[in-house]
Image (tube, rainbow, N blue to C red):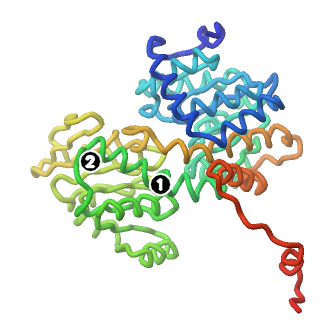
């Protein structure tokens, strides 16, 4: 065990480490792309002598990403990006592997915030953020800690929304790669990963059937598409609510009913929010919901389902199963909120499948390497993942699956590049 990581870490119980190692070993065996990148990093040492701060949902797949960055020569410190998604056994195992960990499951809000600040106080050279919390703290409360940071990468839709708002206002002080906007992120992680992990969490938490029920999916971006697709596959009737006309047409042509939330609220048995916005389910919706409606959020922050207005209509609140709170309304109806309205697939489950996060975290690792190699030429703005990295990750994935592709002939390349097709 590394004495530095042990002395500087904040974890619940180091005795939990053996179970955490088993979890990390399992995902490592199912993340072939990241394994390949790890071998490259071990040989090239792209982060030698650098400090890297990571704030992500701290479970086994994230732990393995931290170990891959560490294998590239970095001194890695990691904190959680959501109080309920941190797994204490994984944290203990990471400490034994030499990573400094500042995370516990379900800390008090003040303690959670303090751990993020302590993460930044290592004065990192590079950061990986999830939801924009690190960047926000750097630009508001601790701008003194910006001095050493070369740049970083952002994981989520929510985080990129915040970063682009900062860029628009002219206050962003470092380059950040928008990993969420890469093809290998939103096509697979957001769609297939979110779709599966949301219902993994809902099913294991409620132990209720989805088939024959009505699932209301609030938002039809890539995550919403995945949730709707999985709900349909489980036998549910699916209703989509949207504010964007093009997405609404797409949902309609994908075979789903589309209607305003106030109408959908009367019909839903399960509600899943995936918008990245606040107050998409509020009091006017609770007032018409069925007795026994189940509410879950798959967006980054716990603001999509309005909890104060839910509480205001309740005469009592109690925990009826692990990760399920029952709100007894004054009119006798009951509403059930999963994982306190936090990110359901990690607050009440294990998150996306390892094979899906293999691509996303490979993008993270390669984007961090790209920032480190080019930070002096990069602007202080939100940057796209270079297409070459996106394609390389996809190629590594195909290779791991034993899938080969056709290649264009010289004549075909010439034809595609020419305006004269004769």
Q: Residues within 10 Å of mark 2 (few under 14, many from 20)?
A: many
Q: Quadrant of residue 286?
A: bottom left
Residue 97's tag is none
Q: Position of residue 70 (x, y in %)?
A: 70, 26
Identified at 55% across, 48% down, the residue is 356
User: 7 or 28, which is in the foreground?
Assistant: 28
Give the vertical position of 218 relative to 110 (above or below): below
Q: Pointer 1: what residue? A: 277
x, y (%) of residue 221? 51, 63
Q: Residue at x 25, y 60 (%)?
A: 211
- For image coordinates 63% across by 20% down, the residue present is 99
Q: Quadrant of the N terminus?
A: top right
Position above or below: 111 against 349: above
Q: Is residue 224 left or right of residue 332?
A: right
- Label 2 SS: helix
Q: Which residue is mark 2?
A: 310
Give SS at disc 1. Answer: loop
Number of residues whose C-alpha sits closer than 10 Å to that of mark 1, classed few (under 14), some (14–19) or many (20 or more): some
Q: Mark 1 or 2 closer to N-term?
A: 1
In the displayed structure, 201 sits above or below 60; it is below
- Left or right, 179 with respect to 417, comes to left
Where on the picture, by quarter, is residue 115?
Answer: top right
Q: Position of residue 395 (x, y in %)?
A: 71, 54
């Amino acid at each position: 065990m590394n004495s530095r990581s042990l002395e500087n870490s904040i974890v619940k119980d180091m005795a939990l480490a053996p179970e955490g190692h088993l979890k990390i070993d399992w995902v490592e065996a199912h993340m072939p792309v990241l394994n390949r990148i790890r071998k490259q990093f071990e040989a090239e040492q792209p982060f030698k002598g650098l400090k890297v701060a990571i704030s992500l949902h701290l479970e086994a797949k994230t732990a393995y990403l931290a170990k891959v960055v560490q294998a590239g020569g970095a001194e890695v410190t990691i904190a959680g990006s959501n109080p309920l998604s941190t797994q204490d056994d994984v944290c203990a195992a990471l400490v034994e592997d030499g990573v400094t960990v500042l995370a516990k499951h379900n800390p008090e809000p003040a303690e959670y915030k303090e751990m993020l600040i302590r993460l930044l106080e290592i004065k990192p050279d590079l950061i990986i953020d999830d939801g924009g919390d690190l960047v926000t703290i750097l630009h508001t409360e601790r701008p003194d800690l910006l001095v050493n940071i070369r740049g970083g990468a952002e994981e989520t839709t929510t985080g990129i929304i915040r970063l682009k708002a900062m860029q628009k206002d002219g206050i962003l002080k470092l380059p950040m790669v928008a990993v969420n906007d890469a093809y290998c992120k939103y096509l697979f992680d957001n769609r297939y990963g979110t779709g599966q992990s949301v219902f993994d969490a809902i099913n294991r938490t409620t132990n209720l059937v989805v088939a024959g029920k009505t699932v209301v999916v609030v938002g039809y971006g890539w995550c919403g598409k995945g949730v709707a697709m999985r709900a349909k596959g489980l036998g549910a009737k699916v209703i989509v609510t949207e504010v964007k006309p093009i997405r609404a047409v797409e949902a309609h042509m994908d075979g789903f009913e589309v209607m305003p939330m106030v109408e959908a609220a009367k019909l839903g048995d399960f509600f899943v929010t995936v918008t990245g916005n606040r107050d998409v389910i509020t009091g006017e919706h609770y007032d018409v919901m069925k007795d026994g409606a189940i509410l879950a959020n798959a967006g980054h922050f716990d603001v999509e389902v309005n909890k104060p207005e839910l509480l205001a209509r309740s005469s009592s609140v109690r925990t009826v199963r692990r990760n399920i709170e029952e709100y007894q309304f004054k009119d006798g109806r009951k509403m059930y909120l999963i994982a306190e309205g936090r990110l359901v697939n990690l607050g009440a489950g294990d998150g996306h499948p390892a094979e899906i996060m293999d691509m996303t975290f490979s993008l993270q690792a390669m984007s961090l390497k790209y920032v480190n190699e080019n930070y002096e030429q990069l602007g202080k703005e939100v940057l796209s993942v270079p297409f070459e990295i996106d394609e390389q990750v996809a190629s590594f994935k195909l290779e791991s699956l034993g899938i080969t592709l056709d290649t264009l002939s010289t004549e075909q390349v010439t034809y595609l590049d020419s305006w004269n097709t004769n």
